[in-house]
Image (cartoon, rainbow, N blue to C red):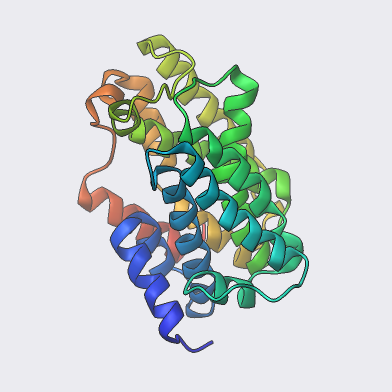
Amino acid sequence: MQFDADLTACADLVQKSDPDRFLATMAAPVQARPLLFALYAFNIELARAPWASQESMIAEMRVQWWRDVGAEIAEGKPVRRHYVATPLARLLKPELAACIDGMAEARRWDIYKDPFEDETEFDRYINRTSGSLMWMAAASLGPADEAVVRDFGYGAGVASWLRAIPELESQKRIPLLDGTLEGVQALARKGLKKLKEAHFSRAAVSKPAGTALLAGWQAEAVLKQAVREPERVAQGGLGLSEFRRRAGLMRRAVTGRW
């Protein structure tokens, strides 16, 4: 598919706002890039919606707008004109667009300052955000076992969440059920366990679908870092050097092993 003005704008947004996913998309086969850029641009827009206003009602309306877009795609209805929604509707299968409703519902947590009620609610948030995004991407590109993709998405989501802790806390959110060093380590270990389970069942994800999992290429290293040095989470010090980051992605892209 040719990159029209909308897809070019999606790619620009991902490059500016989600550089890791931009690199992962550029490492993917050319034919996979339109779908990935549209999905990742949508994810940025939805993630921003809860923070669009200090007024919770306005933020709710922004989230609902994307929820309505998801419903229009899922139901095969004409989709409102928008530089992200328009290409997304063209590229995403209606049955996969049904995931958007859960993603939008999860993002409502970001609007308010209440903590997660329990581990179940936290896990649901990660699964509906990171897990659903990865599942929509993978299932759009090729055959894959949903449980395996979602396990990998959970691990990748926890890694990203831990990296976001300082920013979330600066916005007066309470992002962790247990913010102690031991609690951070336990969450990182749970994420690693999910990644290990996904890797064990790697054969259930076709090579084309596995391209979508490139987006989580740093997750294992970040989670191991959080286990070894949990104090880095509060300091905003999780992450790889630029060399390790790019080399790791290149290696996975070449070998096809996510």
In the displayed structure, would residue 28 be above or below residue 128? below
Tell me which residue sits at (45%, 79%) in the image. Answer: 6
> Which quadrant of the rendered structure holds the N terminus?
bottom right
Q: Nearer the viewer, residue 167 or 220?
A: 167
Do we see residue 165 in this rendering? Answer: yes
Q: Position of residue 202 (x, y in %)?
A: 64, 49
In screen coordinates, is 243 left or right of 1?
A: left
Please state the horizontal and vertical placement of residue 106, each as a whole percent of the image: 59, 39
Residue at 76% across / 62% down in the picture? 95
* Side (left or right) of 194 relative to 204: left
The answer to whether 98 appears left or right of 46 in the picture is right
Asked if residue 138 shows in the view, the reply is no
Q: Position of residue 29 (x, y in %)?
A: 49, 75
**Residue at the spot 63% in from the left edge and 32% down from the top edge:** 124
| Tag count | 0
Residue occupying image coordinates x 35% and y 66%: 13
Quarter assignment of residue 26: bottom left
Tell me where residue 117 appears, x and y as whole percent: 59, 17
Q: Is 254 located above or below residue 154 in the figure?
A: below
Residue 18 drawn above or below residue 230? below
Position of 114 relative to 149 (above/below): above
